[in-house]
Amino acid sequence: MPHFISIFLKRYNMNSLNSGRLLNDMRFWVFLFFVIRLYGITQPPLEIAHNWRQTTVTMVARNFYETDNNIFHPRIDIGGQLSGITGMEFPVFNYLIYLLSLLFGYDHWYGRLINLFVSSIGIIAFYDIIRRLRNHKLAFYAGLILLSSLWFTYSRKIMPDTFSVALVVIGMQQAVIYLLKGTNHWRLALFFLLTAFGLLSKLPAIAAMALLPFLLLNKEYALRLRIRIAVLSVFALFPACWWYFFYIPYLNETFHLVHFFMGKPMLVAGQEITSQWQAAFAQFYETALRYSGFVVFSGGLIIALRKDKRLALYALVSLLMFLILILKAGDNFVRHSYYMIPFIPVMAVLAAFTLVNIQSKKLAVGLLALIMLEGVLNQQHDFRLKEKDLPLLNLEAVLADFSATDELVAINSGEYPTPMYFAHRKGWVSSNQMLSDTTYINELSDNGLKTIIILKRSFGTDLLLPYAEVYNDADFRIYKP
């Protein structure tokens, strides 16, 4: 990556850094937003949005470090007496956390830094693609809009969503440069590797490849170059297809643990989306670019339909690809904002297209500022942690006197794995109702349960059980069944 950055900066024909025109330089804004998002970078994965999803990532990374570093056997901590090995997205992101842990010792926040670094390079690549194919102004506006979109906070979460899309975008940038110049065949290798690993990291990142058909059908580029890109594109899909459609079912069946969501039948998912169409549509205007961004995006789509048929067709192809992903997600799309991430770059381009077609520069800049302010201000809460969740950071220390690290525990956190990660134990996450069922407890005891952890304030509520109580404070109650 550092080599890539140095090549980009050398070949990037702008003198704004030397002339002092920083505000017109995409690199300045990417760097500024990078620094802003370093605030709280070492925080534990306890922020409001999707802490549960982050801890499933950190569980896998920590198990690579402590248990088994086989990248083909990702394992989580909530499989009860099972090994914890389960089917999930290919753990490229998790493994990078593990590799950093080999150098510096394990810590969860490495994932935040890795994602922020790769996602920032992805923004530069996104800008560079548009600049090369269109112009600086459209690219600059689109880059700033993407920076302040949902990408703003998710690019610092310990999740592979922006990470995977960024890898594919960087790969697409290499393809664009190769088609334009026809030299430096190492760019072909970069295109293949980055695209393949991006798709492996999370399959919905394929939406970022919607530009590819337009590049391959463009006769302005030499036919031999387009054929090479097309062939490598097909080969880049093979690893992801093998992993998601063959190996994940094998892992789930072999190790008897299904946890990660891998899509629904389209008919079922379609019915769920249809019944909740208003909430699904709200993801586009409430979540992705917020209200002002959505209005400007809608204007860009209308203008493109009238003035730029190629851009409009690109947007519609992208939307079609994205709709297929929605029809695999079903009501999960409605409930989880990160499903919007693969389509946000397209929305950013169309919103920017509106701005470049506004004759008044002051009005265009004013709308851009409004979009960015609304986007960032509506995400600032994600940098703070709930005070009632902070005692979870002490849970492992509390357990040290009552539970060995290899003993199985049960926690009343419902379906949330977050407390199990901070307990640094393996076992079951259950509801109060389940833990009150003696038959259920007896079954877990037969499978190795040694300790029951009752969370009183965070992720659970207090529960009195007829077992030996070994610890009790304002946050936790611990039983030995």
Image: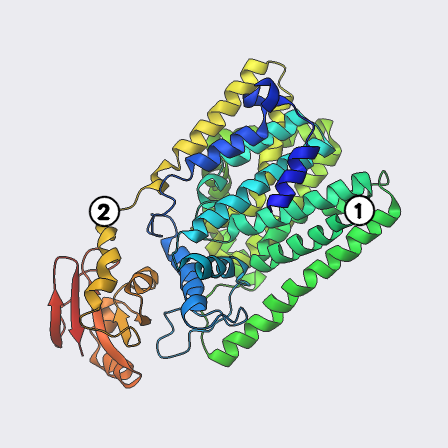
Residue type at numbered disc 2: Glu
Mark 1 and mark 2: span between their CA atoms? 53 Å
The answer to whether residue 251 of the structure is visible from this angle is yes
- SS assignment at label 1: helix
- SS at badge 2: helix
Q: What residue is disc 2 on?
A: 387
Specify the quadrant that holds the C terminus.
Answer: bottom left
Q: Where is residue 164 in the image (x, y as percent from the top left)?
A: 57, 52
Using residue 241 as the reference point, say whether residue 67 is left or right of it. left
Q: State the scheme by which the image is colored.
A: rainbow
393 relative to 24 in the view: left or right: left
Is the C-beta separation of discs 1 and 2 under 8 Å?
no
x%, y% of residue 157?
43, 48
Which amino acid lies under the numbered mark 1 shown in the image of this protein? Answer: Leu
Could you say which disc has been placed on residue 216 in the image?
1
Neighbour tally class for label 2: few under 14, some 14-19, many 20 plus, Cα within 10 Å: few
Mark 1 nearby-residue class (10 Å; few <14, some 14–19, many ≥20): some
Q: Which of marks 1 and 2 is in front?
A: 2
Does residue 319 show up?
no
- Kindly give the residue lying farthest to the front in the view shown: 103
Is 68 displayed left or right of 270 in the figure?
A: left
Q: Position of residue 403 (x, y in %)?
A: 22, 73
Instruction: Give the answer, above or below, for where 412 lies relative to 336.
Output: below
